[in-house]
Amino acid sequence: MNNFVIGLKRFFTNKNVVTILLVLVILVVLYFGYSSSIKKQTQPVNVPVAARTIGAQTEITSEDVTYKQVASRMVDTNVIRSSALIIGKYTNVNVTIPEGSVFYQEWLAEAEDVPGNWIEQLDYEKGELGYYMDVTVESTLGNNVLPNSYIDMYMKATDENGTIMFGKLMKNVKVLVVHDGSGKNVFANSTEIGSPSKIGFAVNQDMYILLKKADYLNIDLVIAPRGATVPTEDYVIVTSATLRDYIDAQTITVEEDIIVEEIPEDNTQTNDETATDNQNTTVTE
């Protein structure tokens, strides 16, 4: 017995033996740690996924969502785990969700933050059409164009003689929405105001077509707060009628359906209560 104890002591005091044992212990710990990590990552979890392919700017209904088990490694903090947080939302701009895909938070938006939807949700005068215009921080005077504020719109163009014309194309235009590049309301969060990319307003059908033509021609349009003084530099100041005639002359040989989308014959997206409030908007000179 004493010989056994002495032999055991010698065995464990041998440096080579101790080293080998430590290496074996480390390998065992690493093995079980790795196995546990792999098991955790491959452990299936139940999450909502797209029941079918959902196009951009589309309202998501209960028929669009189902559940399936996916590996937990696929479920990061941006993956939505409850259908209650999905149904009723809209897919964001330029986002198509393929069938079977999980839903990511940045893919979805509230209805009022989706470009185009504001036309259905906001009231404006009967017979008017919603127009969506590109803007920047600079063109909105440092993001100082707010929803429900009024702007004047100026136009700059060069005539056939090389003269730079400048004038007020519209005045008293009520801004309905201001969106950022992802279609979200710039002023929805007072602590994190976004950068403007689009503003939405309503105009009559003739002005809608005129603005579409101006956009087709890449004409320079400048917005300013209602009644503000705008630098005219060395431009020749002209009337809005002259500017409208210029746009029409430049597009006279272009088919109208190439420039504008089909316009509804009867636009009734309004009510009598708001018609009076909007009566002075979008007035041309």
Image (cartoon, rainbow, N blue to C red):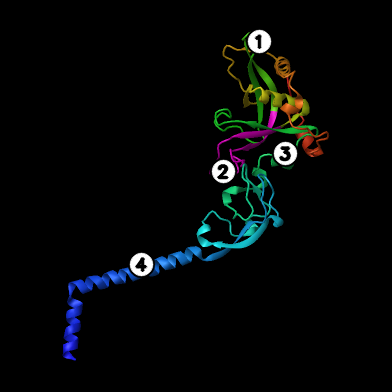
Q: The N terminus appears in which quarter of the rendering?
A: bottom left
The label shown at residue 160 is 1
Q: Give the dominant element type of the magenta stretch: helix, strand or loop.
A: loop
Mark toward the viewer: 4 or 3: 4
Q: Give the left or right position of residue 14, taking residue 109 as reference.
A: left
Residue positioned 58% across, 17% down in the render = 231
Residue positioned 73% across, 24% down in the render = 210
Secondary structure under tag 1 reads: loop
Mark toward the viewer: 1 or 2: 1
Residue 260 locus on image (x, y percent): 73, 29
- Residue identifier under label 2: 190
- Residue identifier under label 3: 119
Amino acid type at circle 1 is: Glu
Mark found first going from the N terminus, 1 or 2: 1
Residue positioned 40% across, 65% down in the render = 34
Q: The C terminus appears in which quarter of the rendering?
A: top right
The label shown at residue 262 is none
The label shown at residue 30 is 4
Amino acid type at circle 3 is: Ile
Is-magenta flag for residue 178? yes
Secondary structure under tag 4 reads: helix
Secondary structure under tag 3 reads: helix
Q: Which residues are magenta?
A: 173-201
Extreme residue in the right direction: 266
